[in-house]
Image (cartoon, rainbow, N blue to C red):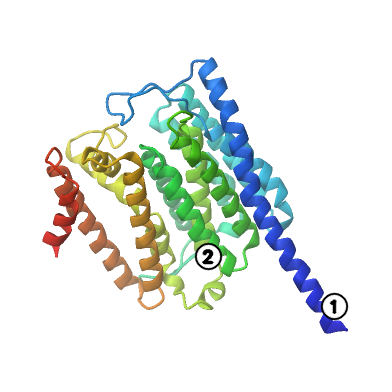
Amino acid sequence: MFNKLDLNLTTKKVENFIFEAIVNLVGSFILVTILIPKISWVVKNRNLINSPEERSSHKDSTPTMAGVSFFFTLIFMLTIIKEWDINAVGINLIAALGLMFAIGLKDDLVVSTPKAKIGGEIIAICFILFSNCVQVESLNGFLGVQEIPVYVSYGIVLLIMLTIINSYNMIDGIDGLASTLGIFIFAIYGFIFYISNQTFYFFLCLSLIGILLAYLRYNLSKTKKIFMGDTGSLVIGFCIGFMSLKFMSLDAALLSIHSFKIENSLIIVGAIFFIPLFDTLRVIGIRLINKKSPFYPDNNHVHHILINSGLSHFKASLFLSLLNLTLAFVFIYLSTILNSLVMISFFIIIFILLLFVFYQLKKNIGQVNSFKHLISAIRIFF
């Protein structure tokens, strides 16, 4: 009798879990699908349309600020899953996202200075910096480092969050890239939180995937195209950073069950976010070499190189997203068998290889079938 009762209770819990997972994924998809046309109508009628700049890869004026739908959908979904928020981090996250949304909205309407944006981002990060559930108090043996002082921990958190937020903002340059990368990144984190029994974060990842899937449909449309704008890229970038912090703060026991070496957590975060990180460091390096500001806009991004080599926006986005996903899987697998010193050496090798590949590809832009030089560059390297 008791065994049957226990079985019925377990079955009911599983059914409730599946139902809520579907609600988060499908509900967020539907909400964004409904909201984006309304936002697009307002943007067009108020003449807030984004006109293409000289360095833009687009030729036509396009509505922007689809990120408004991201923000309101996230707030709504956070209220639905609040019963799973055992650490009450949701209220901190809502406050932080509200500030990020305001920063992005101002930048979409009236261009903000880099200092103003970073200042606002730091304040937003502080809303979750002191949350008990995302504190990074140890590097868990990364390069031999264990416990770290509180002020060092805060510095690391700020650096990681600022890097992720602004790298994601910078990668949003062609149709489909930011959203596809985001979908893959949240899918990886969602799986990690699922096997780690972190239900709140798993549901939040599903909501974010639903949001980006709905947006992707419009972003790739020829007749209903819209950009997420800074309102979207800053909010999504912040969520990626938040998930990264949660992953790094997970109890080692939760990950060791799956043969994951906790000392590799920081490297895994870099691998999951590899392409945006690679692109940002590469572009900033080029700007500094040319004695320009790191924030100086140009068309040296990897996605610009790919489309200038003959790829469409969709193909370039798919190529970079699949490359990012592949590298994430490779590093996650290697993290179960290699220590952090070997892992970071491998990370640097891959980074240098890609620098060489894109250097060769850019050098051959303008030649017939220049994208084929991507394969040739890899062969030359080996």
Furthest toward the right, the residue is: 1
What whole-number distance in Å separates the C-alpha atoms at marks 1 and 2? 31 Å
Work out whether residue 284 or residue 26 is closer to the camera in this orientation and state it. Answer: 26
Which residue corresponds to mark 1?
A: 5
Q: Quadrant of residue 133?
A: bottom right
When the figure is inspected, residue 211 is found, relative to residue 58, above or below; the finding is: below
When the figure is inspected, residue 8 is found, relative to residue 33, above or below; the finding is: below
User: Which residue is found at the position 67% from the left and 47% from the top?
Assistant: 78
Furthest toward the front, the residue is: 223
Q: Tell which tag, 1 or 2, sits nearer the viewer.
A: 1
Q: How many marks?
A: 2
Query: Which amino acid, by three-letter code, is at mark 2?
Result: Ile
In the image, 250: left or right of 1?
Answer: left
Rendered-image quadrant of the N terminus:
bottom right
Query: Which amino acid, by three-letter code, is at mark 1?
Result: Leu
Q: x%, y% of residue 200?
A: 65, 57
User: Which residue is found at the position 50% from the left and 26% from the top?
Assistant: 106
User: Which residue is found at the position 46% from the left and 54% from the top?
Assistant: 185
Element marked by disc 1: helix
- In this view of the protein, can residue 98 be seen by the observer? no
Which residue corresponds to mark 2?
A: 192
When the figure is inspected, residue 257 is found, relative to residue 271, above or below; the finding is: below
Element marked by disc 2: helix
Q: x%, y% of residue 59?
A: 32, 25
Q: x%, y% of residue 88?
A: 69, 53
Mark 1–mark 2 CB contact (< 8 Å):
no
Q: Quadrant of residue 126?
A: top right
When the figure is inspected, residue 80 is found, relative to residue 221, above or below; the finding is: below
- In this view of the protein, can residue 227 be seen by the observer? yes
